[in-house]
Amino acid sequence: MSEEAVTTGEGRSVGILEIKEMIPHRYPFLLIDRVDNIIKDEGAVGLKNVTINEPFFEGHFPRQPVMPGVLIIEAMAQTAAVLVVETLDGEAAGKLVYFMTVDEARFRKPVTPGDQLKIHVTKTRSRGAVWKFEGKAMVDGKLVAEAKFAAMIMDD
């Protein structure tokens, strides 16, 4: 997805209620609040407002709360799932997205309460039920995490 597409906001946006219609995740594991700039078959930008009320902060780490990296990658996957459902015009709504691979994951900076994660996901390939993506998580315009991942879309 081009940077211009992201900044001009030419794609569709969906809020939390529509996200809940599109993917099966629920609290406490629904990790995106909104998805902006959805451009079918290309990419989307997920939004996660990180608050101290997140259940994982009780144990990770109580004196220095840090969002676990695996949950940042999960937020990338959820953003990708919304992109898939939008691309398939709702045919994939409610289906399950199973991780197949996570490659080249890098965590550059801790994500803490008060941060707003912007999760840029780009589809790199799709063949049948298998989709491949690149994800970059940003806070205040700075890269905090990135990964390449693949998922399989399956019936519930």
Image (cartoon, grey):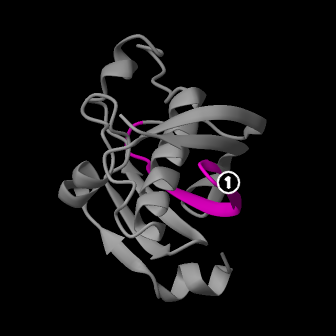
Asked which secondary structure carries label 1, the reply is strand
Answer yes or no: is residue 75 visible. Answer: yes
Q: Quadrant of the C terminus?
A: top left
Residue 24 in magenta?
Answer: no
Residue 53 position, x and y percent, is: 25, 29
Is residue 2 found left or right of 62 in the rendered image? right
Residue under the point 66% across and 40% down = 109
Q: How many marks?
A: 1
Residue 126 position, x and y percent, is: 68, 58
What is the span of residues highlighted in magenta in the rendered image? 113-130
Which is more toward the observer, 19 or 41? 41
Residue 12 position, x and y percent, is: 38, 79
The image quarter containing residue 22 is bottom left
Residue under the point 63% across and 87% down = 4
Furthest toward the right, the residue is 104
Q: Which residue is mark 1?
A: 133
